[in-house]
Amino acid sequence: MLNAELLALLVCPETRQDLTLATPAETARLNEAIRQGLVQTAAGKNMLQPVDGALIRVDRAIAYPIREGIPVMLVAEGLSIAQLDLTS
C-alpha cells in the first residue's frame, strides 16, 4: 500500500486537509455502498467500480480512491461519503 512518508505528505487537493488511510473494514463498507449505488463522485457521477483502498479527508466528507496502489487525487474524482457511516 502507501508508505508512511508518502501518506504524511498527501493532503486534500481542494481543502488542504489531512488525509487518513481507510482501514480494511472502512474500505469494505465503502465498496458495499458503491455496490448499492450510494456513492457519487464530487462531480456528481455515480461511482460504479470498487476501490482498492481510500484516503479519507479529516472531516470525513470526501474519500479519494486508491486504484492499483495509486491514490487518485483529483477533486472531481473524490467520493462523497459524508452520508455514509464507514466506522460502524
Image: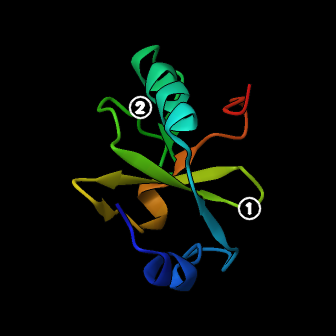
Which is more toward the observer, 43 or 70? Answer: 70
Name the spot of residue 73 as percent of width and height, x first.
42, 68
Kindly identify the amino acid type of the residue bearing the numbered disc 1: Val
Mark 1 to mark 2: distance in Å?
23 Å
28 left or right of 66?
Answer: right
In the image, is 15 to the left or to the right of 80? right
Residue located at (52% from left, 79% from top): 10
Residue at (39%, 34%) from the top-left corner?
Answer: 47
| Label 1 SS | loop
Question: In the rendered image of this protein, does residue 39 appear above or below residue 61?
Answer: above
**Is 27 placed left or right of 81 in the picture?**
left
Vertical side of 41 occupied by 77: above or below: below
Residue indicated by mark 2: 46
Percent from the top left, x then y, of residue 7?
A: 50, 75
Asked if disc 1 and disc 2 are in contact, CB closer than 8 Å, the reply is no
Q: Quadrant of the C terminus?
A: top right
Q: Which image quarter holds the N terminus?
A: bottom left
Observer-side mark, 1 or 2, equals 1
| Name of the residue lying farthest toward the top | 36
The residue lying toward the viewer, choosing from 59 and 25, is: 25
Q: Amino acid at mark 2?
A: Asn
Q: Which mark is residue 58?
A: 1
Instruction: Indicate the position of residue 43 as horizontal and vertical percent values.
Output: 47, 50
